[in-house]
Amino acid sequence: MSLASEVAVLKAPCSNPVMRIVRLSPRVAEQIAAGEVIERPAAVVKELIENSLDAGATEISVVLEEGGKALIEVLDNGHGIAPEDLPLALARHATSKIKALEDLESLHTLGFRGEALASIGAVSRLEVLSHVQTSAQSLGPHRVRLDHSTQELSSPRPEPATFGHFLGKPHGTRIRVEGLFSQIPARLKFLKSAGSELSAVREWMERLALAHPQVGFQLRSDSKEVLNLRPQSEEDRVRMIVAEGEDFPLLSAESSAGQGLQLKVYWVQGMSLSHTRNLIQLVNGRALRDRLIQQAMLGPFRQALLPGKFPAACAFLTVDPREIDVNVHPTKTEIRFLEPRKLFIAFDEALGSLIHAHGSISYVGSSGHTQSSGFSQSDLMLGAAEKPHASHTTGAPAHGSLPVRHPALAPFTPGQFLGVLFRTYLAYDLGEELGLIDQHAAHERIRYEGLKKRALSRAASQDSQALLIPEVVRFEGGKESELETKLPLLRQLGFEAEIFGPGQLLFRASPPEWGTQDLRVRLSGLVDRLFSLERATKNPSNESLFLDEKLFEKLASEACRSSIRAGDRVEAWGANALIEQLSQCEHPWNCPHGRPTVARVPKARFEEWFQRTV
Ligand code: ADP
Ligand code: MG
């Protein structure tokens, strides 16, 4: 193409006539609006189950054909919809759940936007059959249908008495969605295979089922049973879904970050996965996929899992409705927090204490595949250990079909030292288990903590180093006096800083330990952390201020370089010294980058290998 024609092409759009504005037909507008709420069968199922839960159902059954592309049917035994309300239920912006905007401040239902049924009806053939039974009189079940192409609604017709019951109750609702997107090729082509759509449906159902363990859930797909969850305790449901029925120890802890936010979190100790599907967030009974919550959940695992690995955990958050905005996304899968910091505090406290106390180490489970697992730090420690304030759940699950679990926390009082395997693993006979320690990972952890301690104490005691050119860090104007009160903390760490003008902090010197690489960015991160400190922790810790990503990496790689390696010779006395020092560590379970330091193999595995058990 010549330059001249290229220029002509570039100019072309500008020479177009001005486009005229036309009003979209209600049908097209409806379909476009539907696109925000409904993108695939899983979204339909989520909305319909939320409606069933809002209607107080104790049993919900979902039937799919072709992954929901041909048919989605949701049946519940909730309170039902009165015949005269049926047309309204299908209208956009019609809801029985709120009346005014202020009602969002005290919302106790999952729905409130009044657009799910209307949206579903815009992109499929929709039929609603429902029955309300009051003590006075019953009009019997009624049914409405929405005509797909004309969007006309049939008037509610009584259903012949042949319709039996709604999952054991005389009242309830059945919603059928046929041919989702069949008339909208542009949307249809984005649907995946029936199998992928089914797994997405199942994932959302499981999340909602976790939030409502007292409710029974069934899922059938192309006449095969996929899920059948009977009403059960919260813990059992977590074990079934988050731990996938495997016999990992299930630990739990609670915390509250001030008023208005309570957290109960379950952690499937030792399950490490390469995806985030088993990281579940439930807020006030609502299943979410919120980026910020995920970030807060993963924070405490920073040093406990390798990069790219994710834990299995389920968070039940109870938040004062006034502290959140649930109306930020049409699918209601994200929310906004008034004070996001509280989230981080709560997760740091609850999950942080569990990880600190129990660690995540490798464990050879019953199915023979390696699982990372753990035992308590107090078991590893030779001396007396502080009691973690987290509670861990013990005891066999009530549900009969669940496998029996291994004891969660077996003792690791260093037993008899057996020798070194493959010139890498220190082996101990623990009586009922074989204990293994990775000599490099363990030493790395010991060295890292030593280096960290040294860096902190040097920063506090050594002279700070004047900067060649002072650095100015900007902060939010008006916060000068708040910052002023926190400056002594920086001084303790070897920084010299003063408020320079509105919203400006001038750094004249920094501790030599910090180095000068990327200084400006790092100082600005330091100021951010300083601002968030007091609200985050009751006793501001110098460590969390001082230790940024850069310094962490520097110390971790120094620790790695100066540690004994795999293949290096370790004698018995060295092995004992290593385990002794490891047990003094703050976080003995992993090397700084998250690789496990300890593994254990139960005696039962050996018996399996040698077929002593039948
Ligand atoms: P929203 O849930 O936001 O109110 P929907 O479009 O999902 O909006 O539902 C509209 C209305 O229809 C609800 O407010 C409720 O009154 C009624 N409804 C829908 N599904 C059910 C159901 N399964 N049981 C009882 N009522 C229902
Ligand atoms: Mg709804």
Image: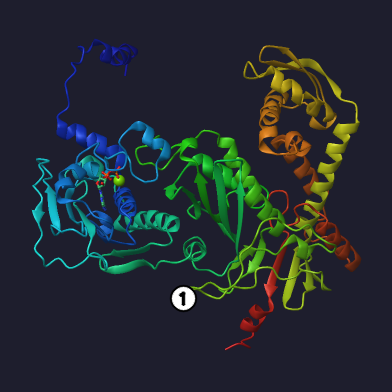
Quarter-of-image position of residue 605: bottom right
* Total marks in image: 1
* Left or right: 536 in relation to 564: left
* Left or right: 39 in relation to 143: right
Asked whether 480 or 405 is in front, the reply is: 480
Tell me the residue that label 1 is attached to. 401
Does 490 appear above or below 575? above
* Left or right: 289 in relation to 538: left
Residue 526 picture location, percent across and down: 71, 28
* Left or right: 315 in relation to 44: right
Mark 1 CB within 8 Å of ligand 1? no
Residue at image position (11%, 67%) is: 162
Q: What element carries label 1?
A: loop
Q: Is residue 523 visible in the rendered structure shown here? A: yes
Does 288 appear above or below 421? above
Residue at image position (81%, 58%) is: 582
Q: How many residues crowd mark 1 within 10 Å: few (<14), some (14–19), many (20+)?
A: few
Quarter-of-image position of residue 524: top right
Asked whether 213 or 103 is in front, the reply is: 103
Asked whether 64 or 597 is in front, the reply is: 64
Residue at image position (71%, 22%) is: 483
Residue at image position (84%, 38%) is: 455
Q: Is residue 90 visible in the rendered structure shown here? A: no
Residue 584 picture location, percent across and down: 83, 56
Which quarter shows the C terminus?
bottom right
Mark 1: amino acid: Ser
